[in-house]
Image (cartoon, rainbow, N blue to C red):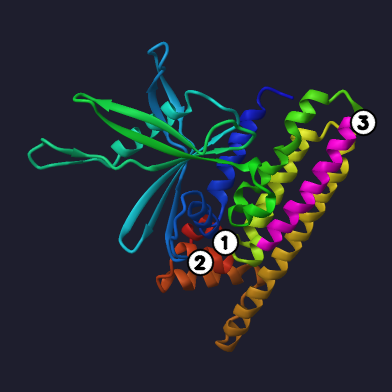
Amino acid sequence: MRRNTGKLFDSNFKFIIAEASSQAVLHLINRLFRKQYPPNTIVEVREPKELTTENPKSGDLGEIFTDMVITLSSDGQKDTYLIEAQIKDDSEIMLRIFNYSVQIAMKSKTISEDGNRMVIEMPSPAVVYLETSKTKDYLTIEVRFPGKKSVIYKVPAFKILEHKASELEDMALLLPFYLLKIREELKKSEKDPAKRKELSERLKGYVSEICEVLHKSQENFYITGKDAVMLQERMSSMHSRLYGRYKEFRESNMTLKQMYNKSVLKKLDDAEARAEAKAVKAEAKGEKRGLTQGLTQVAKAMKATGDTVSKIMSCTGLSRREISAL
């Protein structure tokens, strides 16, 4: 396995969260942090931030990038979340998250008129472990102050591979990383053809299970059709990078590709149906619009009437960027 595999997981995690629909991100936050935000919650996903930090060992300053910072706005309340993806156990992860959180909070600090009081609001953090971890369900830092006063800073840890794929229906954005289920075993026995064959059969079963969960997730409106296509494309790409050089794994990769092709066709069918419905209304007004313009026109109309971006994304399947450009 290549050493840059960790970067592969990290970049895929960031890409998935950044490109996902608001409803998919909202369901992920609700499950991860045990919240119950309503469907009309406004979701803002910020690109990874570049921060200046000090190396705890050398004291040198350097540039780091946080993972995903997500802000949810509902009923006049605005909450910020920081999600860090982690591939391996790391004793420094808590310190990094605390550092990220402080620097993110400082961006929105408030200072009293007399300058004697500053208030910062820390984001709610979580660590998502993409592979097996010995970490407990919570990571903690005890911050001690003079006078024997202390504050316990707790960070929940979610370990994907400790769950069945069926348990991730409302967290479908994490499903691509279920492909890592056999990676460690394969690393230990990659030169054994019989073991590779056994592991390939297991992976094929996991892939079939993932396909079924993705379908249910879309049916139950945890994700959009566009999300499903994006996730399947990510899975196919990750599978090729992780297992592509082993002939025993070609069948599971073919299953992923077939699933991806079917989802693309379904998404096109759904888009065509929505566009046709819009075209019928337009025709009654003497307007004629092409198939490709239908979804865009629907989005423009919803935007003009004040519908939220998340609602427009859910109804049209267009991305946040596409809607913002209208």
From this viewpoint, which residue is outermost toward the bottom?
284
Disc 2 residue crowd, few under 14, some 14–19, many 20+, Cα 10 Å: many
Disc nearest the viewer among 2 and 3? 3
Check contact, mark 1 vs mark 2: CB within 8 A: yes
Of the image marks 3 and 1, the number of the one nearer the N terminus: 3
For disc 3, the marked residue is 194
Whole-Å distance between the Cαs marked 3 and 1?
A: 46 Å
Q: Nearer the viewer, residue 77 or 259?
A: 77
Q: In the rendered view, does 255 fall on the left or right side of 79?
A: right
Q: Which residues are magenta?
A: 195-216
> Mark on residue 198?
none
Instruction: Identify the residue at horizontal 56%, vertical 53% (top origin).
Output: 20
Q: Quadrant of residue 145?
A: top left
The kind of secondary structure element at disc 2 is helix
> Mark on residue 312?
2
Q: Is residue 220 above or below residue 180?
A: below
Of the image marks 2 and 3, the number of the one nearer the N terminus: 3
For disc 1, the marked residue is 318
